[in-house]
Image (spheres, rainbow, N blue to C red):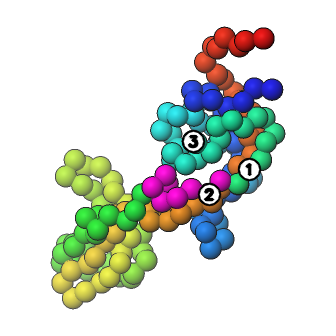
């Protein structure tokens, strides 16, 4: 049976959770996730986790911070002037907002603290600093580069 190799396009079902068991994402009730292995479409630990799997295989993969979304970067904590927020907007810690950067790109942020003059915003990925656990089921290998297979 064919085993997943770098460059293959695969379809997987997955259940992602934190090490404390809290689910953060799952393909349950949706089409399987399709991606090309090794292309950077998914985090490195997930990419590496599917290597060598065969259709129908199920496994649990522990992904350390460095192979997931990396550690929290203190430089991604932004001090934002409160007087630049519309007066009618009530900000609370944990609230998710979108900012536009100097190139006009949308940057999702989370309100960390609301002070008298400054709001602290966290622009780190929500899963930065977390070790992750994924239950993965390989549904199929959709496409693979041509290979010479020795008899």
Picture coordinates of residue 122 (x, y %)? 34, 69
Asked whether the viewer can see residue 19, the reply is yes
Q: Secondary structure at mark 2?
A: strand
**Disc 3 marks which residue?**
47
Residue 37's quadrant in the figure?
top right
Task: Give the alpha-carbon distance from disc 3 to disc 1, as whole Å.
Answer: 13 Å
Q: Nearer the viewer, mark 3 or mark 2?
A: 2
Residue 25 visible in the picture: no
Say if the magenta span includes residue 133. no
The residue lying toward the viewer, choosing from 46 and 82, is 46
Mark 1 → mark 2, Cα distance in angstroms: 10 Å
Please give the name of the residue rendered at 59% of the width and 67% of the height, measured from the top-left corner.
Answer: 18
Q: Position of residue 13 (x, y in %)?
A: 71, 47
**The residue stretch that appears in magenta:** 61-68
| Residue carrying label 2 | 62
Question: How far across and how far down the image is residue 9, in percent?
Answer: 62, 29
Q: Residue at x 43, y 77 (%)?
A: 94
């Amino acid at each position: 049976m064919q085993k997943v190799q770098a460059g293959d396009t695969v379809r997987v079902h997955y259940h992602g959770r934190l090490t404390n068991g809290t689910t953060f994402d799952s393909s349950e009730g949706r089409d399987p996730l399709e991606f090309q292995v090794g292309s950077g479409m998914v985090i490195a630990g997930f990419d590496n986790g599917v290597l060598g799997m065969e259709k129908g295989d199920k496994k649990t993969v522990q992904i350390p911070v460095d192979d997931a979304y990396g550690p929290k970067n203190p430089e991604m904590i932004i001090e934002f002037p409160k007087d630049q927020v519309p007066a009618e907007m009530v900000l609370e810690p944990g609230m998710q907002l979108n900012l536009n950067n100097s190139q006009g790109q949308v940057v999702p942020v989370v309100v960390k603290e609301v002070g008298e003059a400054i709001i602290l915003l966290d622009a780190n990925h929500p899963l930065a600093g977390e070790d992750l656990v994924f239950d993965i089921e390989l549904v199929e290998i959709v496409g693979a580069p041509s290979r010479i297979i020795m008899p």
